[in-house]
């Protein structure tokens, strides 16, 4: 082939990747992914009482809040434009039973919190977990008999839990329990109760992770938990199985799916988004938050830069949104520009 003056192949020195990076305006032009406030969901912990605020020791900056303070706290999230919050209850130990019956009490803490938040912020999306662990004296997401986590009996209860939460005003029901068949059963239960517009965000690929430790402190289930969750949550080494889980949840009617934890599982986020193209969320979980905050508080990491870099990583992997305890912190940084 004849050499031409303009054909030199792609190699150095003709190609210099640094040219595009030289000036800030140019870096802005070539940016492939952006993080915005629309991408962030803020998980919050609720406790009984009035004017109560309890720090979660393993999650610096995170507190359990009573409903009145929850409403005050969400004001900033609403001002910053966060689309949604996810609420989790800290259930007093005396209300936890082996049949987890408090989960289906329409006046339980989580339902009261949802009603309170929706009354003040009707335009804020409210997401609730569906799983028995905060209410179960065994600390498991399902009912336990003779050391076995029961699937079908648990699903019946999860359906009732979903319906009471949706009736309280919850917009998105998020089953985090990893029982088989629960998404379809919950969809039918919601529809049967006339709640056809309530969305389902399935914790579809949820791994049996050490990174949930601080969350279990926050909701007070770590002391109660007997054994581990490996008979229902996934093996951290499995990626193909995650795709099967997601396929099933979509077939059963999930409106959105989630991968959890986040940063150690971004390959799974990528594969899910590529394979299904459905709204895909990832959970930057409590242990990831704890690692980042611990290092930042020691001065070992730059707090703000490490946060924004972690969150843009989720976007690059294809996540449509991120659940993060740092949602408001991130939104403040984004607002500053
Ligand atoms: C409960 C639930 C867990 C999380 C969300 N929902 C913990 C678990 O499955 O043990 C973890 C969230 C986090 O670590 O931030 N089913």
Image (spheres, helix red, strand yellow):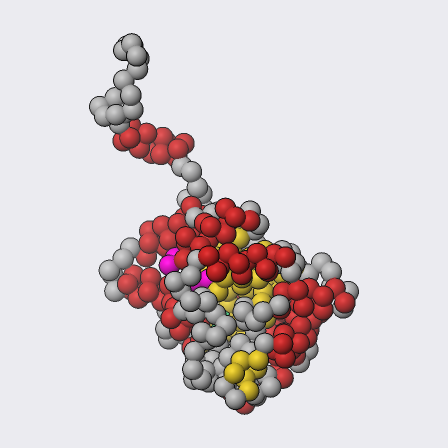
Tell me residue 184's x, y (percent).
Answer: 66, 64
Tell me residue 38's x, y (percent).
Answer: 53, 49
Q: Is residue 256 visible?
A: yes
Residue beneath the point at 67% across and 72% down: 159
Tell me residue 320's x, y (percent).
Answer: 52, 49
When the figure is inspected, residue 217 is found, relative to residue 38, above or below; the finding is below
When the figure is inspected, residue 34 is found, relative to residue 78, above or below; the finding is above
Q: Quadrant of the C terminus?
A: top left
When the figure is inspected, residue 149 is found, relative to residue 16, above or below; the finding is below
Q: Quadrant of the N terminus?
A: top left
Residue beneath the point at 48% across and 65% down: 206
Q: State which region is magenta.
A: 260-264
Whether residue 200 is in magenta: the answer is: no
When the figure is inspected, residue 217 is found, relative to residue 22, above or below; the finding is below
Most foreground residue, 252 or 157: 252
Residue beneath the point at 69% across and 71% down: 163
Whether residue 263 is in magenta: the answer is: yes
Tell me residue 204's x, y (percent).
Answer: 54, 61
Most foreground residue, 335 or 151: 151
**Quadrant of the image occupied by residue 25:** top left
Residue beneath the point at 45% across and 82% down: 225
């Amino acid at each position: 082939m004849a050499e031409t003056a303009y054909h030199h192949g792609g190699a150095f020195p003709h190609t210099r990747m640094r040219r595009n990076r030289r000036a800030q305006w140019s870096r802005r032009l070539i940016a492939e992914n952006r993080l915005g406030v629309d991408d962030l969901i803020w998980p919050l912990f609720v406790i009984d009482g009035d004017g109560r605020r309890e720090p979660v020791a393993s999650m610096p900056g995170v507190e359990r809040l009573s409903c009145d303070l929850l409403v005050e706290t969400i004001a900033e999230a609403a001002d910053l434009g966060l689309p949604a919050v996810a609420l989790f209850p800290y259930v007093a130990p005396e209300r936890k039973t082996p049949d987890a019956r408090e989960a289906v009490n329409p006046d339980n803490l989580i339902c009261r919190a949802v009603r309170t938040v929706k009354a003040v912020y009707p335009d804020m999306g409210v997401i609730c977990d569906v799983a028995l662990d905060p209410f179960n004296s065994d600390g498991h997401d399902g009912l336990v008999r003779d050391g076995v986590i029961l699937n079908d009996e648990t699903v019946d209860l999860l359906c009732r839990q979903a319906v009471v939460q949706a009736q309280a005003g919850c917009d998105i029901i998020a089953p985090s329990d990893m029982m088989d068949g629960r998404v379809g059963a919950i969809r039918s239960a919601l529809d049967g109760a006339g709640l056809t517009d309530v969305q389902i965000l399935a914790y579809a690929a949820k791994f049996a992770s050490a990174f949930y430790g601080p969350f279990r402190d926050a909701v007070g289930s770590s002391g109660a938990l007997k054994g581990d969750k490996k008979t229902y949550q996934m093996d951290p080494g499995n990626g193909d199985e995650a795709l099967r889980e997601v396929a099933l949840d979509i077939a059963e009617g999930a409106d959105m799916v989630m991968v959890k934890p986040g940063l150690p599982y971004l390959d799974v986020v990528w594969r899910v988004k590529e394979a299904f193209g459905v709204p895909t969320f990832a959970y930057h979980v409590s242990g990831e938050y704890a690692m980042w905050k611990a290092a930042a508080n020691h001065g070992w990491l730059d707090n703000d830069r490490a946060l924004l870099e972690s969150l843009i990583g989720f976007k690059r992997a294809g996540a449509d949104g991120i659940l993060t305890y740092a949602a408001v912190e991130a939104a403040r940084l984004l607002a500053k520009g």
